[in-house]
Image (cartoon, rainbow, N blue to C red):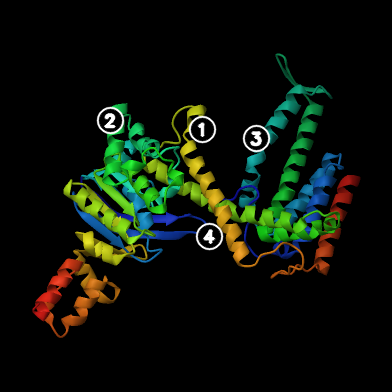
């Protein structure tokens, strides 16, 4: 069920944080991870991340499943580092294959870095509802409004896009079913044939998406929707002490990681 | 063919917090050449039920039998041909550049030769009364025309059981009437029809038997008179009128179809 970027709706102190604080903390961490140059430093951040996942009340198994999509990249990185690095003492040799200690160390370091990057972003999306995320991004981008950047419109587009992912998924499932009832088979043949068998699904799906977009635009207009200026929100975001505290802890963890 | 569902269960999103039991032990048969109406409120499991008839959904418990044989042992393509399933709002799945290309999709998948495919397309478009639209783009048609083209696309497989999930939803009365005529025509040709509908009046008009679903269970199944007179408050207008008069004039009997009710009322008033 859970996959990368999916919201995991449970009640926890991490879920309760202001989305702006979480977005900033994530951005700081993601950038900061590239400043950490020791494996020990990364391990320290990893421990902090485990504690964070614990506090967010996401079952560990579900969180690990969230990391599964990047497994391929991790494996690829490890294989390349281990096989092609010629640094340090030789640990193992078989024919032209040589494994060096430096390669192993670098593989571990990069694996940790990738998993942390994805894990940090994963905590943000798993603990922040898509609508909150969009609201937070709108607020964070709003200083750019002075430069005529359409912050509200961008956030609205994101919200709508996120909102319609499950709807499109449902629609795709329905169309797949309807075509399967007419004898379509999506699993037989080579990749080319399978790609072609998707045409009867993709064409109606696209047509439907355009129709839906038109309908939504009309529905918004008939309810008097008018862009950003002077628009208020049903849910006001409030930046509280604990949000500041969370940001401080993030920076602290990162600093210790860099120094280690 | 005889289609039988035995104690079919279905659970959506099993094992997650979003788990929903949609079917809780449904048993029913579709006899050869009959029209079976399936009625029930939204969320009663009608659409889930019909998706089990050609095994688009696999039952979590129970079995689906085709002429007494477990349907899971049949070839999937063979089962899908014999049990034609028309989804709710089937026009959402039209995809080809022209109407006849779209209707030809299913017969081509059956591996028929080109002459046979053309013949089937012509025939099923004709049955739906939209033969003149063959060269048009399906996206440029009216809602009713699209609906009929989409139904023709399933009919072109030559199914032995045709399952229609709310085929008349949102159609004008004339098109609705033509679809009911088509159902009668198919019954005469020996094709069994399963008609899922919220419109009790149209079910009363064409169904030989009616199955009422509630919360994933069959709560009544039998002739339209048996099912509708059990709870006349939730019955077609014809049944409601007759049951109102039944207290004072029991000789009115239990008419169901429009014609029957008119005849019974005429007999009462001696016209």
Mark 1 or mark 3: which comes first in sequence? 3
| Position of residue A168 measured from the top left corner of the image (x, y, whole percent) | 54, 50
Q: CA distance from mark 3 to mark 2?
A: 48 Å
Instruction: Specify the quadrant that holds the N terminus of chain B.
Output: top left
* Location of mark 3 (residue): A72
| Position of residue A253 measured from the top left corner of the image (x, y, whole percent) | 85, 53
A156 vs A100, left or right, is left
A92 vs B241, left or right, is right
* Location of mark 4 (residue): B17
User: Alpha-carbon neighbours of circle 1 within 10 Å: few (<14), some, or many (≥20)?
Assistant: few
Q: CA distance from mark 2 to mark 4?
A: 50 Å
Q: Chain of mark 1?
A: A
Mark 2 or mark 4: which comes first in sequence? 4
Disc 3 is placed on an element classified as: helix
Discs 1 and 3 lie in a common subunit: yes
Q: Nearer the viewer, residue A245 or B107?
A: B107
Disc 2 is placed on an element classified as: helix
Q: CA distance from mark 2 to mark 1?
A: 27 Å
Q: Nearer the viewer, residue A213 or A139?
A: A213
Instruction: Specify the quadrant that holds the C terminus of chain B.
Output: bottom left
Seen as rendered, the residue at the extreme front is B132
Disc 4 is placed on an element classified as: loop
Residue sitting at 26 percent across and 56 percent down? B180
Q: Chain of mark 3?
A: A
Seen as rendered, the residue at the extreme bottom is B248
User: Alpha-carbon neighbours of circle 3 within 10 Å: few (<14), some, or many (≥20)?
Assistant: few
- Whether the residues at callouts 3 and 4 have beta carbons within 8 Å, the answer is no
State which quadrant residue A160 falls in: bottom right
Discs 2 and 4 lie in a common subunit: yes
Asked if A259 appears above or below B177 in the picture, the reply is above
């Amino acid at each position: 069920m859970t996959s990368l970027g999916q919201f995991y709706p449970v009640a926890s102190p991490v879920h309760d944080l202001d989305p702006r604080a979480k977005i900033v903390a994530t951005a700081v961490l993601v950038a900061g991870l590239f400043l950490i140059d020791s494996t020990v430093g990364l391990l320290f951040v990893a421990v902090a991340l485990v504690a964070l996942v614990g506090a967010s009340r996401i079952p560990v198994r579900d969180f690990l499943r969230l990391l599964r999509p990047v497994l391929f990249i991790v494996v690829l990185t490890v294989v390349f580092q281990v096989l092609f690095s010629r640094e340090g003492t030789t640990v193992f040799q078989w024919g032209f294959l040589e494994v060096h200690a430096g390669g192993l160390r670098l593989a571990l370091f990069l694996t940790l870095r990738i998993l942390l990057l994805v894990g940090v972003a994963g905590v943000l999306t798993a603990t922040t509802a898509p609508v909150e995320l969009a609201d937070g991004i709108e607020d964070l981008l709003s200083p750019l409004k002075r430069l005529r950047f359409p912050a509200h419109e961008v956030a609205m587009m994101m919200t709508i896009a996120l909102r319609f992912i499950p709807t499109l998924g449902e629609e795709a499932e329905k169309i797949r079913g309807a075509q399967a009832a007419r004898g379509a088979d999506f699993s037989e043949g080579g990749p080319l044939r399978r790609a072609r068998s998707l045409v009867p699904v993709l064409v109606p799906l696209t047509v439907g998406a355009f129709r839906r977009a038109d309908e939504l635009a009309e529905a918004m207009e008939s309810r008097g929707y008018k862009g950003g200026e002077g628009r208020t929100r049903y849910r006001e975001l409030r930046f509280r002490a604990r949000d500041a505290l969370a940001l401080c802890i993030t920076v602290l963890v990162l600093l210790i990681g860099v120094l280690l | 063919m005889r289609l039988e569902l035995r104690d079919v269960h279905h659970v959506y999103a099993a094992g997650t917090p979003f788990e929903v039991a949609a079917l809780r032990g449904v048993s029913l048969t579709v006899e050869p050449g009959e029209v079976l109406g399936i009625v029930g409120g939204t969320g009663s499991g009608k659409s889930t039920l019909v998706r089990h008839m050609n095994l688009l959904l696999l039952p979590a418990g129970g079995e689906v039998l085709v002429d007494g044989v477990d349907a899971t042992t049949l070839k999937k393509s063979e089962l899908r041909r014999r049990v034609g399933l028309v989804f709710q709002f089937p026009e959402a799945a039209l995809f080809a550049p022209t109407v006849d290309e779209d209707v030809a999709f299913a017969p081509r998948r059956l591996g028929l030769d080109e002459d046979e495919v053309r013949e089937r397309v012509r025939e099923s478009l004709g049955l739906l009364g939209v033969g003149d639209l063959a060269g048009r783009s399906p996206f440029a048609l009216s809602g009713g025309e699209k609906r009929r083209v989409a139904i023709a696309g399933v009919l072109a497989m030559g199914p032995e059981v045709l399952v229609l999930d709310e085929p008349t939803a949102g159609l004008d009365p004339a098109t609705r009437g033509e679809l009911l005529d088509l159902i009668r025509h198919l019954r005469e040709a020996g094709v069994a029809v399963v008609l899922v509908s919220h419109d009790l009046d149209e079910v009363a008009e064409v169904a030989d038997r009616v199955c009422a679903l509630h919360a994933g269970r069959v709560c009544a199944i039998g002739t339209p008179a048996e099912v509708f007179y059990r709870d006349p408050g939730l019955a077609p207008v014809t049944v409601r009128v007759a049951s109102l008069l039944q207290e004072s004039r029991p000789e009115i009997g239990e008419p169901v179809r429009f014609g029957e009710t008119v005849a019974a009322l005429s007999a009462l008033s001696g016209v």
